[in-house]
Amino acid sequence: PGMDYFENFKNELEQNFNKYQYIICVSINRVKSKQIQDIRKFLRNRATILIERRSLINYYLKHELLYLYKSWGFLIKNIKGNVGMIFTDEDPRIINKILNRFYLSAPAFAGHISTKNIKIKKGIKPLSPSQTPFFQALGIPTRISKGSIDIIDNLLFVRKKEMFSVSHVVLLNKLGIKPFRYGMKIVNIFKKKLEIKLSYLKIDNNQINSNISHIIKKNSATEGKTIGFSKSHLSYNIYLINRNIQSFLISNADW
């Protein structure tokens, strides 16, 4: 890239750090450029995505944007390789749901270590009987049903932390099984220089509202005659409690 690229990147980096309230760091291991382009397009006007080498971001923060490094330098200290940062004012849970939509399935590769147990379900597979010897060599019991191979039992084909062999990969490909999914994965969330724990992404507003509503209704059923709860009063209380809970969870780094 020419000097214009670096100058534009520095300006964009500075602008985004100062403009948005959330900075979401994402892992981009094995993420394809087409995935990143599609996510950028979908998030247009809602978020800005910057992806660059950690060393370049570190250089600008340490030397040309030093006032930002004092506040934000810690963002990249524990990140290796390329850095993906999403700058946004949207709730991180919304961003996370969007990122999950763009995950892609991927096949296994010989020599790689499996990160999970991979199972093959029993039943008829769209493979001709001529493939039977291959299954026999792998010790997988089969029979012929309706002119196709029928795997007799469910089986644990590859165990977690086991290395994929060529035979593993060939069979999974024959069965059309792509056991892995890759996409942008959120690894850190920051708001106003405070870190929000990733467990925040699992909070369900509907569940919170349901729980609060149940508690208030239960209390109002026993004490409503003396307290004088109305439906509007109940709804407003739910709104206030939910808002306060959300505000507390987002603004506290140690929750």
Image: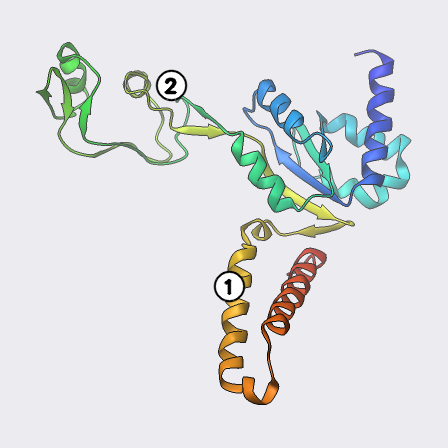
From the viewer's perspective, tell me whether residue 210 is left or right of residue 60: left
Whether residue 252 is situated above or below residue 88 in the rendered picture: below
Rounded to the nearest angstrom, the CA distance separating label 2 from label 1 is 48 Å
Residue at 56% from the left image edge and 52% from the top image edge: 199
Q: Mark 2 belongs to which amino acid?
A: Ala
Residue 78 appears anywhere in the view? no
Q: Residue furthest bottom?
A: 226
Q: In which quadrant of the rendered image does the C terminus lie?
A: bottom right
Residue 110: image x %, image y %?
38, 18
Callout 2 secondary element: loop
Badge 2 density bin: few <14, some 14–19, many ≥20, Cα 10 Å: few
Whether residue 1 is situated above or below residue 223 in the rendered picture: above
Q: Mark 1 belongs to which amino acid?
A: Ser
Residue at 51% from the left image edge and 66% from the top image edge: 211
From the viewer's perspective, tell me whether residue 104 is left or right of residue 150: right
Label 2 with label 1: CB-CB less than 8 Å: no
Callout 1 secondary element: helix
Number of the front mark, 2 or 1? 1
* Residue assigned mark 2: 110
Residue 181: image x %, image y %?
46, 29
Residue 72: image x %, image y %?
79, 42
First-in-chain label (2 vs 1): 2
